[in-house]
Amino acid sequence: MSELILHHYAGSPFSEKVRLILGLKGMAWRSVIVPNIMPKPDVIALTGGYRRTPFMQIGADIYCDTALMCRVIDALKPEPPLYPTATAGLADIVAQWADTTLFWTAVPFTLQPAGAPHVLKNATPEMLKAFGADRAAMNPHMRRATVTDGAAALTTYLSRLEHLLGDGQPFLLGALPCIADFSAAQSVWFIHLAPPVAAVLEAYPKVEAWYRRVNGFGQGALTKMKSAEALEVASSSTPAALSFSAEPGLALGDEVTVTPTDYAHDAVGGKLVGLSTREVVIARTDERAATVHVHFPRIAFQIKKLQPA
Ligand SMILES: N[C@@H](CCC(=O)N[C@@H](CS)C(=O)NCC(=O)O)C(=O)O
């Protein structure tokens, strides 16, 4: 099998979620650092337009969105399980809450004026301005919580996590770590990047002890790779075989676009080659990456069939 390549950057919470999971699994992986704002020409060559971070590559297969990437990683290395049977269902529901509600509370709160310079260390005022403009364009209609509202919500959410850990269990849902731990840990990790903001965590000793436990899984064994090399890997590989389960209005070979429904609404166009209730896969060809299969989850993505001209 081709190597697992994670395209990510240091300050990305969703990347941290995946890095810690690779640590739990004790996996070896290749690390390609991508820009944290647009333009990202080498990213787009592989994904076809999806700009969010991280994404994962195995040969000529590109996996977008951590919800799908984590399932793929778990299938590659089932032990220890990321979705233990004892908490199946609940773990995904808590993870989905952490990836959306908790994330969109913790991140703007951490990026308040007292926090942003710590997170975006060494950034010049121009870079900070460019970062703000990039994120505003990525998500123009989102009404972000004010610092006061964010503090109130975060206090409530951290109390809930503290309660979950209340009877001395080591992980959020019990004795075993699961996807919910990693989805929640990424936000606590991000808050820690800004020490003046991280003071908010002091009132939650169980959350802090749990976070140290999750952080202790490390990041697995990574080796750096340049994005040009990742493009060569894609162009010299053949995408993996797929299954297709037709749905009303969607047939194998249809020309479609796939677009995130929450934010960063960049449509990726291609031929529909894989479909299930969990995953959609499109084939597309790029001058540098050649033919790749780009995989997306079904949740929070829209498939749109293009009408023939
Ligand atoms: N649902 C996505 C969310 C990914 C996401 O929002 N990532 C942030 C960074 S942590 C992002 O893409 N920011 C813009 C960028 O990196 O260009 C996932 O699970 O992968």
Image: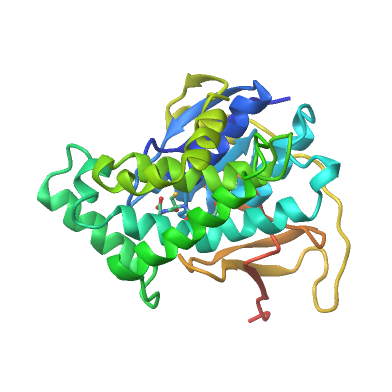
Who is closer to the viewer here, 198 or 247? 198
Q: Residue 295 appears at what percent x and percent y?
A: 67, 52
State the residue at coordinates (65%, 20%): 26
Q: Is residue 196 visible?
A: yes
State the residue at coordinates (66%, 56%): 94
* Vertical order, 271 against 28 (above or below): below
Q: Residue 42 appears at what percent x and percent y?
A: 43, 43
Q: Residue 5 appears at what percent x and percent y?
A: 57, 31
Q: Quadrant of the C terminus?
A: bottom right
Q: Residue 138 appears at what percent x and percent y?
A: 38, 65
Who is closer to the viewer here, 209 or 118? 209
202 on left or right of 293: left
255 on left or right of 203: right
Q: Residue furthest front?
A: 167
* Vertical order, 20 against 304 (above or below): above
Q: Quadrant of the N terminus?
A: top right
* Vertical order, 166 against 77 (above or below): below
Q: Is residue 49 visible?
A: no
Who is closer to the viewer here, 94 or 151? 151
State the residue at coordinates (23%, 50%): 116
